[in-house]
Image (cartoon, rainbow, N blue to C red):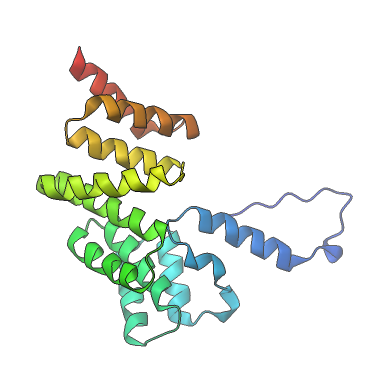
Amino acid sequence: MVRINIPRANKLSQIDWNVVTKYVQDIFSIKTLIDGVRALEYTELSNTEVLAWRNYYTGKYEDASFYFKSLLKEKQKNQVVILEGLAHSQYMSFNYKDALQTINKCIENVGTENQYLTKACILAEDGVVTRSKGKLIEAKNIFYQYLLEGNDNEIGHYNFANTLKSLGDLEEAVKQYKLCLQINPNNAQAWKNLGSIYYGLT
């Protein structure tokens, strides 16, 4: 749900709703790792695309994956954006194997920083679950490069910290959790993970 506050001095008839629509789209786009969706105009989407993104943004990732796969079969335009949506939906559904294959296809086509960040997140989660040190090290290297290039954001620091923690590099993990919390002091999971490190060190 989106609430828009309009001062009483303003008249609804004088509002440019295209500006409002673009603003709302931009805000929702920021919530995802997907860059390409920011450029999409909702009026240009097919019914299947609308269903895919609606399920994606409401957290119904398995349903979103189904519609994204249907779009790939239909060979719609914006294939890379659809692949990114599918990869992230698979990732959020804990389907790491398929998510990794999908994001690798994106990287083969474009290779944006956010696609590499998504890959690192998938590798990190999968590495923790399967106890694969190789995947964790690969994720660590991608996170390190991503942050080295000046991408100072909560997702990068948080997932880098988790990866370092899983690899036993607790001192550096603490630094990354603190950097994450500087950006978003309300990240409860970062506080929890940081606390667990301190508890383990006592």
Specify the quadrant that holds the C terminus: top left
Q: Is residue 184 visible?
A: no
Residue visible at 21% across and 30% down in the picture:
169
Outermost residue, bottom direction? 74
Q: Quadrant of residue 188?
A: top left
User: Considering only vertical position in the picture, is 91 above or below 147?
Assistant: below
Q: Residue furthest top?
A: 202
Which residue occupies the foreground of this view, 176 or 198?
176
Q: Is residue 199 visible?
A: yes
Residue at 48 percent across and 52 percent down: it is 31
On the rendered structure, is 195 left or right of 55? left
The percent position of residue 170, horizontal first and vertical second, equals 23, 26
Vertical placement of 195 versus 190: above or below? above
Question: x, y (%) of residue 128?
Answer: 16, 44
For residue 98, what is the image quadrant? bottom left
Q: Nearer the viewer, residue 124 or 192?
A: 124
Image location (x, y in percent) of residue 81: 42, 71
Picture quarter with the N terminus: bottom right
Residue 19 pos. (x, y %) = 72, 63
What is the total number of numbered labels drawn onto the structure image?
A: 0
Left or right, 111 with reference to 124: right
Say which residue appears at 60% left-offset and 78% top-offset: 43
Look at the picture and state if 60 lies above or below 79.
Answer: above
Q: Residue at x 24, y 23 (%)?
A: 197
Residue 172 in which image quadrant = top left
Front residue (pair 137, 10): 137
